[in-house]
Image (spheres, rainbow, N blue to C red):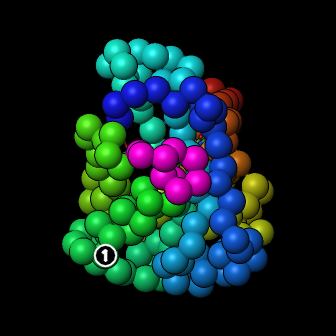
Amino acid sequence: MKGGYPDIAHHSILFGPRYKGLLGDIYGGRVPEDFSLYLHHPSITDPAMAPPGHSTFYALAPVAHLGKTQPDWDGAFGARFADAILEEVERRVAPGLRANIVTRFHYTPADFGRDLAAHLGSAFSLEPLLWQSAYFRAHNRDHIISNLYFVGAGTHPGAGIPGVVGSAKATAQLMLDR
Ligand SMILES: Cc1cc2nc3c(=O)[nH]c(=O)nc-3n(C[C@H](O)[C@H](O)[C@H](O)COP(=O)(O)OP(=O)(O)OC[C@H]3O[C@@H](n4cnc5c(N)ncnc54)[C@H](O)[C@@H]3O)c2cc1C
């Protein structure tokens, strides 16, 4: 984006008007019309993340995976959803944002499925339900085939960089123990 946004922090969460209802939509497979957005503004911390006189941002809107709903992410629906997010960010924290955009793209569950082979386009692997969390997530060594190992967001202890690094350490230790 052209210009600087000194009042927008590196990490922000723009809460929408609903909480429980919004989660119900996401987990129930309805693409909501309101958002709770995570807004990332890395160039405020590291100006090298954008050319001089420019800023860089991304906004993350949680949505259901492709096993629950398959809107036309690659077509008009995906483009409309991206526009609605930009409109919300502009309205809430960045007046004039859309006029200042130099380059933009959006990345949907369809892209996660296609580019990263993510099952059902899920960006966070298995749903973090109680019975799929921590000890109940896939173990790092298979309980039948003892020399088959697993690592990453779908395995114990879980998704997110700290979880994935923890899972790599646990899996490596199991291998070393042998
Ligand atoms: C938008 C977004 C923001 C996030 N923000 C944060 C954050 O702020 N903090 C945090 O802790 N976590 C965050 N996460 C979660 C975190 O990024 C993931 O949990 C983590 O990257 C998962 O690591 P992984 O190694 O299991 O899988 P991935 O990083 O997905 O790596 C799997 C790799 O395997 C490749 N692959 C797939 N199939 C094959 C195949 N058949 N052959 C060869 N290669 C294959 C894929 O292309 C991919 O490169 C975020 C996730 C997203 C999507």
Residue pictured at 64% horizontal, 54% vertical: 14
Q: In front: 62, or 142?
A: 62
Residue pictured at 57% horizontal, 47% vertical: 93
* Disc 1: CA contacts within 10 A as few (<14), some (14-19) or many (>=20): few
Residue 90 in the image: x percent, y percent? 48, 52
* Horizontal side, residue 94 vs residue 18: left or right: left
Residue pictured at 45% horizontal, 44% vertical: 58
Segment colored magenta: 89-97
Image quadrant in which the C terminus is located: top right
Residue 10 in the image: x percent, y percent? 60, 31
Q: Amino acid at mark 1?
A: Phe
The image shows residue 109, relative to residue 34, as above or below, that is above
Residue 54 in the image: x percent, y percent? 37, 25
Residue 53 in the image: x percent, y percent? 36, 19
Residue pictured at 55% horizontal, 63% vertical: 62
Can residue 109 be seen in this snapshot? no
Can residue 103 be seen in this snapshot? yes
Q: Residue furthest left?
A: 75
Q: In front: 137, or 64?
A: 64
Please tell me whether residue 134 belongs to the stretch shown in magenta. Answer: no
* Horizontal side, residue 42 vs residue 132: left or right: left
Q: In front: 95, or 62?
A: 95
* Horizontal side, residue 177 vs residue 6: left or right: right
Image quadrant in which the N terminus is located: top left
Q: In front: 88, or 23?
A: 88
Q: Secondary structure at mark 1?
A: helix
For label 1, the residue is 77
The image shows residue 10, relative to residue 128, as above or below, that is above
